[in-house]
Image (spheres, rainbow, N blue to C red):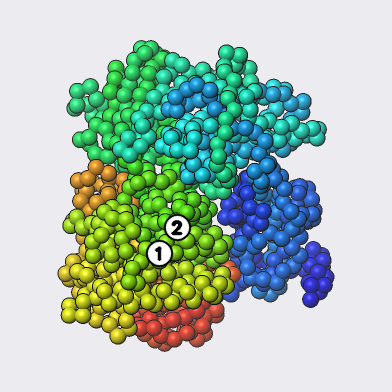
Amino acid sequence: MKILWMLFICLLPLKGIAESSIRIYDLQCEYQSDPLGIDTETPRFSWKLSDAAQTRGQRQTAYQLLVSGSPSLLEQNQGDIWDSGPVTSDQSVLIAYKGKKLISNQVYYWKVRVFDKDNKATAWSPAARFSMGLLSPSDWKGCWIKHPDVSPEQHIWFRKSFSLEQPAENAFLHIASMGYHELYVNGRKADDRVLAPALSRLDKRVLYVTYDIAKLLKAGKNTIAIWQGPGWARYNYFANNIHPALRAQTDIRTKAGNSLSIQTDNSWKCAVSSSSNTGKYQYFDMGGECVDARKHQTDWNMPYFDDNRWQAAQETSLNVTLSSQMMEPSRIIETLPARKITDTVPGIYKIDMGKNFTGWLDIKMNGMSAGDTVVITVADDPETIQDFGQRNLYICKGEPDESFRNRFNFIAGRYINIQGMKQKPKLSDIKGYVIATDLQRSGYFTCSDDLFNRIYETDLWTYRMCTTEGYTSDCPHRERLGYGEVAFATAWGIGLPNYRSAAYLAKHVRDWTDVQEWTGWIHHTAPQINEHYGGPMWSSAGLNISWEYYLTYGDKRILESIYGPAKQWLEYLYQNSAWGLLEAYAGGGKFLGDWAAPKQRKEFGGTPESFFFNNCVYAMNLETVAQIADLLEKPDDAALYRKRLNALRKKIQKQFYDTETGLYMEGNQVQTAFPLWRKITPDSLSASVLAHFEEEFTHNHPYLDMGSSGLPVLLKFLTEEQDFNEAMAGHLSSTDEPSYGYFLKRGETTWPEYWNVDVPSRIHTCYTGIASWFIKSVGGIRPDPSHPGYQQFIIKPSPIRQLTFARTETESLYGTIKSDWKKKDHLLELAISIPVNTKATVYLPATSADKVRENGKPLSEAEGIKTLGEAGKKLLIEVESGNYTFTMPY
């Protein structure tokens, strides 16, 4: 068969052979476009397909992938590193590399072509590339270096000069920094990333960034310069000899074939820069920056700069693992103009930036004298002058149009308070630079209700403002800690359906394995650890995110990475169980149940409410790991965890269900939804418990009665398990406390920490995740648990009464999925788009196939459609790839 395929392939380039109408686009290696410095020896390749002819049922039947060591060989269709040959397969995502051994610090080029449903070949895709990082610790030749005698809050300049006889053809520079860095080559910043690298657990792992600097080098004298700030190294300063330091190296190959290695050692020069951190970089005092413009040396990063008076860098050591940052960097994603300036408070200019944001300030000032000090503080609300130690200082040099701008710390808030300026600034003098992990947006929702649109977009904006450093934080100003319950809720509810999150979340899952202790217990925050509040829903974030990740991307590698830590976690819970139920292994704030719910409800550790909630979490974890064990072909483990799960379900039911009242605990929404969702409630009682939930949700407490850890329970139950969409729409239409609409009525631009907005922290992820309902319920686009990865998925729209239209889309690894519906003249029109090489199960809101038309035709006559039957009041059909427009009475 393979020989016949090869003969067929050889004939394809001949004139007269018809070419497929499929186009290949968006080539990705390990979920990234042209990534640099990847550190996996078996990378995976993905691509998307589009069809200009819009052929229904169009799909891939085979592919051929080439990997080459040079662009010229690839252009000649030679895969000298790997030629997969023709592979009969419909898989176009996560194709594992199977070629020659990949080498550290090398660059590779690849392309692919596919064969369509009629076995016609496509044209070759555009070429893509990836480079390898340093795959072994022994590949690192450079030393860790630091300034020999400065305090940890200082920002440091490092530089190294050298000469090249010829221009560079190839040069990748790898930088690992304990703290943040900016790279300059001959005075030019190497790229547009900021706050590099992403945060990791610094006493265990430091991420390195790979830069392609070949085009920045020149024949003659060159200078590599690095500006470093301490970042989170100050938070962990006294832990395991943590201190600001950096390690870098590059191997430069010139166009003449010569090579030169540059590595960090004590031949590098260093000096204290013109800026430093303020504050203590800790809870309630994340500080800001102090810039002394008088001390700035303009050309410090240029080849001609005289560094003879600088000190020699000191070689040092750090006992950490170095890993490549295989995810998107932080970048400036938006520029905000100042909206309003007031001076009603004596000596203070108050700047309203229009909305809460996380990022940097750029403030221009005039009329200042050398040595004048300007104090810049930040707050969430208009009355407060300074929140959470956010205090920046600028010491003037006394020149026109001088300006303050952050570099190695950031602010979060809306109101900027400036003291010490001699002239009132103009609105044009002040900008805000919004900084976040640069996740590409891939999900969109809009509908006929403006409040719904604002809730959806505010949910996303709050999330982005808490992703500044490569993880999801609770808030970007007071704590900046990656609490687990919000990490889970936002990954499921916002990240996966609305952003290209695969690389970002894969890194975050590893963060959670890095914060596991030898006992099996997992800290409540990642990647940085602390002694703050949390419980099992917090600690199981890595496991919970991994499962949602698998459902979205179909990637078993994430399950393999979490499986060992998940088993240790389950063993820890098992060892802390008595009489078959999980006990409070830590009291007070360390075994929390649902947290920060309406009416100030907080379930502290040791209470009956927390026991119930956390045993449900334990059951959820057991079920998830049993499913993973099945997928990884570990039947003994799967059997063990299901045995424990069945026993635990019975114990929870016996201990916490009141047979007289028919309630679990007080019977609130989360307490009722959790046992229903995790199948703890016996089948014989499900109807009565569900009836109570309906009464509770629609009448007794007609609002979302959930806290930060109850949110993923309640929203997943409402979005994926049960249809209470009309009631949900009513709750989301409310502007009374507690509700999202109440926040917006009060003028909030991000979600606060508690349902009452009169709280200190007004940028918080406690209630983020409601965006999921708009995408997955109103639009109805969701993964199919029976077919993870979106090659087959579900569209189950909910045309709720108060809306006249809703337009929804989300991008999978296979392409963009759309679900647009509108009502007119008692008809519902549903237009859907199914990417090439996929299919979908569609739930049409119709009771009979006879009442549905597709582009004016009966379903039985429409191409690409198979009727599956009825489910409740829905008609189930299966559709192949293509665009469809259905109409039905409504």
Q: Is residue 76 left or right of residue 882?
A: right
The x and y percentages for residue 167 are: 74, 30
Q: Which residue is mark 2?
A: 520
At x 82%, y 66%, the residue is 10
- Residue 838 in view: no
Do tag 1 and tag 2 residues touch (Cβ < 8 Å)? yes
Q: CA distance from mark 1 to mark 2?
A: 10 Å
Name which residue lies at 57% across and 13% down. 309
* Badge nearest the viewer, 1 or 2: 1
- Of the numbered discs in the image, which one, if any, rests on residue 849? none
Name the residue nearer the viewer: 475 or 49.
475
Q: Helix, strand or loop at disc 1? A: helix
- Kind of residue at disc 1: Gln
Task: Work out which quarter of the rendered image holds the C terminus and state it.
Answer: bottom left
- What secondary structure is marked by label 2? loop
Which quadrant is home to the N terminus? Answer: bottom right
- Residue 175 seen: yes
Q: Residues within 10 Å of mark 1 (few under 14, many from 20)?
A: few
Q: Nearer the viewer, residue 758 or 805?
A: 758
Q: Residue at x 46, y 21 (%)?
A: 274
Q: Is residue 674 above or below residue 251?
A: below
Residue 634: x %, y % from top left? 56, 72
- Percent across and percent down for residue 219 are 73, 26
In the displayed structure, would residue 389 be above or below residue 296? below
Find disc 1 in the rendering and name its residue: 575
Residue 333 position (above or below residue 835): above
Q: Is residue 297 left or right of residue 360?
A: right
> Callout 2: 10 Å neighbours few (<14), some, many (20+)?
some
Q: Nearer the viewer, residue 485 or 313?
A: 313
- Which amino acid, mark 2? Gly
- Comes first in the chain, label 1 or label 2: 2
